[in-house]
Image (cartoon, rainbow, N blue to C red):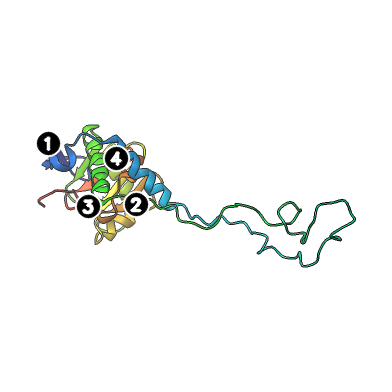
Amino acid sequence: MTTLDLRTQDGGVAGSVELNDAIFGLEPNIHVLHQVVTAQLAARRSGSAKTKTRAEVRGGGAKPYAQKGTGRARAGSTRSPQFRGGGVVHGPRPRSYAQKVNKKMIQLALNSALSDRAQSERLVVVDAWKFATPKTKDAVQVIEALDLMGKVLIVVDEQDQTAARSFRNLPNVQLVQCAELNAYDILCCDWLVFSQATLPGSEA
């Protein structure tokens, strides 16, 4: 197993922690990462674009001109697609853009993203969050002490509301709960921070 320093909030080292090679020691699968991230972004689309057909637009009840004698093509309604104000042919309709992805692929993509951050030395494990009260000022000091630059993804426990409320107002910090950790959020951030309680594959 790969060994990583176990950090404290003030930037010190409190020991070491072993990373599970089945999660953090994989060769990142780029193809699976691409497919899973694409599916995740597609699922976010609302799919609410819609145009009205000639049956849905208002008006067009009267025949615009006589059937014969005008020299023009026959027309029964001014709401046909060729008329201004008419319906739209083959326009967008409400739909779902969701793509089906197997659970094993989702897990492989997550492990690939975690392995990439571990191999890039962009992974930090903190022994525990020890905030007495929720304070953004204290959270800023923690980020500076750990020397985290750029966008930071912090994985928090669902029960640890004090830490979550301390970090949530920082513009370059994104919070995610353990159960909601995903490959896309990991790849979008420069640093990934776990506590010892939220580290995947940890015996703690």
Three-letter amino acid code at disc 2?
A: Lys
73 relative position to 107: left or right: right
Identify the mark at residue 88; answer none if there is no mark: none
Q: Amino acid at mark 1?
A: Thr
Q: Is disc 1 in contact with disc 4, using a CB cutoff of under 8 Å?
A: no
- In this rendering, would 66 be left or right of 7? right
Instruction: Name the residue tied to disc 2.
Output: 100
Contact flag, marks 2 and 1 (Cβ < 8 Å): no
Q: Could you classify mark 2 by the number of other residues whose Cα lies within 10 Å: few (under 14), some (14-19), or many (20 or more)?
A: few
Q: Nearer the viewer, mark 4 or mark 2?
A: 2
Residue pointed to by mark 3: 129
Q: Taking the image as drawn, is residue 123 in sight?
A: yes
- Name the amino acid type tagged 4: Val
Packing grade of label 4 (10 A; few <14, some 14-19, many >=20) is some
Residue at the image position 23 percent from the left and 44 percent from the top: 108
CA–CA distance in space, label 1 to label 3: 23 Å
Quadrant into which the N terminus falls:
top left
Residue that appears at 70% across and 53% down:
81
Per the image, the residue denoted by label 4 is 32
| Secondary structure type for disc 3 | loop
State the separation of the CA atoms marked 4 and 2: 13 Å
> Residue 154: percent from the left, percent from the top?
29, 48
Determine whether, in the image, residue 103 is placed left or right of residue 48. left
Foreground mark, 3 or 2, reads 2
The nearer-to-camera label among 1 and 3 is 1
- Report the mark closest to the observer, 4 or 3: 4
